[in-house]
Amino acid sequence: MSSSNLPPSILLALKAARLGTWQLDSMTKTLHADAYAQQLLGVSANADYQTFLDSLHPSSQHQVSQLIEQALYEEIPIDFTFQRNGDSNQWIRWWGASEREAGSLVLRGVAQAVTPPAPSNHFNSLQPLFELSDDSVVGLALLDENDFTYLRVNTCYATLSGSTVEKLLGSSFMRTIPETKRVDLEKSLRQVLSSGEVLRVNEVEIPLKSPEKRSSHYVDLTYQPQWNEDSQRYTQLLVLATDVTGQVYMRRELENQRAQLEHVIQSAPVSIARLVGPEFKLSTVNQAFIEIAGKGPHILNKPLIEVMPEIEGQPFLALLEEVYTEQHVFEQKALPAWIVEKGQTRHKFFNVCYAPLANEDGQSYGVLCFSIDVTDQVKLQKRIEQSSQSLQNAVDLAELGTWTIHVEDQLLSFSPSVSRWIGFSSPLTFEQINTMALNARVLEEAFRKALSKQGKRRLEVEFEIVNPQTKQTYILYALGTTQFNEQDRATYLRGFVRDVTAERKMQQVLESKVEDRTRQLATSNENLQASNEELVLTNEHLSRSNESLEQFAFIASHDLQEPLRKIRQFCDLLVKYYNRDQVLNETYLDRIRQSASRMSELVSDLLAFSQISNATPKLKDVDLNKILERVQENLFVSLEETQAQLQIAPLPKVMGDALQLEQLWQNLVSNALKFSSKDQTGQKQTPRIVIDAQIVPASQLPNPLQVKAKRYYQLSIQDNGVGFEEKYAERIFGVFQRLHGKAEFKGSGIGLSICQKVAHNHGGLITAESQIGKGALFNVYLPAQL
């Protein structure tokens, strides 16, 4: 029965009692409400069931829905109070009963606005806390054990959750949790309710926008179980939420900065170490320090003196102690140190900086050490200083001066040695220099060329300058280079200057002497030319004389030989055809024959000597062994008659004329046979001839020989003949030189002269050694072809 079917008196009574009527049909699920009930619920006159439920506070929807569903299936009375959704102060009492009508159940009743129900003792105890925390920076929320529905929420909690108080109240806390974490969190919260232990979860990330516009923020959550005296168990959870977003981001920023600082420290080329405590234990080190220490990376938390015992007795520990106690920074460049590297102690140099480390109370707790290995730079600087000093010594020794020209100011500065020449010690302008220079234009032109970008960018000039103090004139030679800046503009000229006055004066004297000498040489050349002309005439005369000698040799070999042959033939005929008695004097005929024979031999030897003297040897490889074989063939008769003993060693090959060398050896062997000695009975002894050969260096040759090769063959022939006195060792090689009478030994006295000529023609030499009665030794030296 709707309110329109009620009597007016009942309607008036309901209105006076401020009661509204309602009816819910189980079939249509439609709520029919009068005007007052519509006002209380905030629904239309015929609202559907879901709209009715949505008008209720979420915390009441579940309970109301269960009661109504039960009443729509069985006839039971209902009476419950609920909060209207969206209005925390609007509470409605809803009571009635269900009855069957036309085959279905209809639920009818009245609705009345009531004051909020009195809370339980526990909920009432939390009420002041929520009222005071509305403006707090701590978020508070009260969760019911059923689905962990929000019962109370303050503004701070709603803000941290990225929502509003109205949206959170009556909603499930679990819906705000990601699905992947809901099961674990619900299990943990159920454990809190059952155990009564507080659960704290720190830095929970909430992927919503925070007040700082960040993509996510972080809160610390504390879940406190709340005891229910009525049911004697924990039925609610008080959630405290604290915003820690700033701390989290700050900590992460500090961690990033620390990581970046650690990266910078580890990758820095500077050695960095943090020493902690009075024992200076290594708290932090980078790779550069590890390399200096040379003990590997396992050195942390060890005292510095244990890691680097070699610093004992060096100033480092005392300096660290001073920085630690006095709390002041120590810096020094090129601090020397002895460091052990790979087992060897090396002398090093470091730029160091020690800075004290202090805590919040200002107490020292360590030292931060920076060091840079500058050994190479220090050594280089010392070499530069030594080079500079050596250069300065060389400049002083060479009596050089240095100078610098500042191009922009056109100002010249110079070393003290220059001031002696120009009479000034302070810098001079170009105008002042030009007034002292005797050839200022030369200076200006040299300066202009030195500043040219297209030129050699150097200054080289010689000029004369007058010292205004002493009035002495100096000739100076200046040489320098131009320096350009990044804009390719000349900035400075720097170089050396030398006093060449004495040199130029000496040069003038030398030039004068050279001129005099040139004139003298010209006169001498004229005299030499005249002498050369005379020599030409003399050579022509000699050439004619040589031709005459050649003609003489030809005449001697043909014309002179012919009468000698006829004299010998006539003497032979006289002896042959006439009796000895008929010959007036046989002795005279024998003498005539002997004289003609000696004359013929003499002419032959002269001819041979002349031919060897004028002939040019035809050089080729000559085997001396074969030469000696032919010599033995030529002297076969003499060798047989004398029964001579020849001992010939292997002989080398030489470059020479075979005919001349054969004549040389034939004369030497022939002499050895001819000048054989006699025994005590007056009988000639058997000749013994030894021929040998060896190689000797040029340094062991006799002095008269002009050395033409590094090595020579020494060819020797030793006999046991009569010998001769040592004083005649050189004389015997002269033409017609005889040491014995004609009757004693035959010969013309030309044979050894021919040997000497042959040796000379082959770039060699022949020498003789002998003593009376002990034979003779002849050495022939010929260039060795190696």
Image: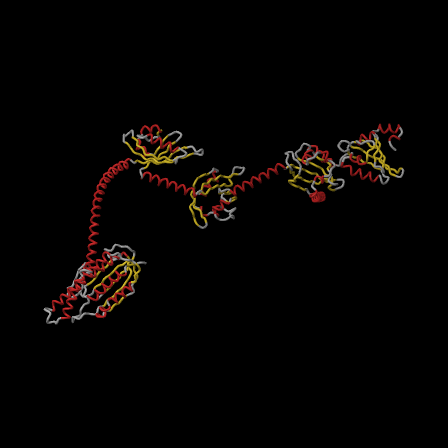
Q: Nearer the viewer, residue 631 or 358?
A: 631
Position of residue 299 relative to residue 777, above or below, is: above
Q: Nearer the viewer, residue 554 or 127?
A: 554
Identify the residue at the far left of this view. 584
Residue 196 in sight in this render: no
Position of residue 384 relative to residue 615, above or below, is: above
Q: Is residue 381 left or right of residue 603?
A: right
Task: Give the number of callouts.
Answer: 0
Q: Nearer the viewer, residue 129 or 259?
A: 259
User: Percent x, y for residue 464?
Assistant: 30, 32
Q: Quadrant of the N terminus?
A: top right
Residue 564 in sight in this render: yes
Query: What's the residue at 27%, 55% (across, down)?
Result: 707
Q: Examine the image and state in which quarter residue 734 appears.
A: bottom left
Q: Quadrant of the C terminus?
A: bottom left
Position of residue 16 relative to residue 216, above or below, is: above
User: Percent x, y for residue 500?
Assistant: 29, 36
Q: Is residue 471 left or right of residue 736?
A: right
Query: What's the residue at 40%, 30% (across, down)?
Result: 408
User: Percent x, y for residue 597?
Assistant: 17, 65
Q: Examine the image and state in which quarter residue 437 appears.
A: top left
Q: Nearer the viewer, residue 76 or 641?
A: 641
Q: Examine the image and state in which quarter residue 714 appears.
A: bottom left
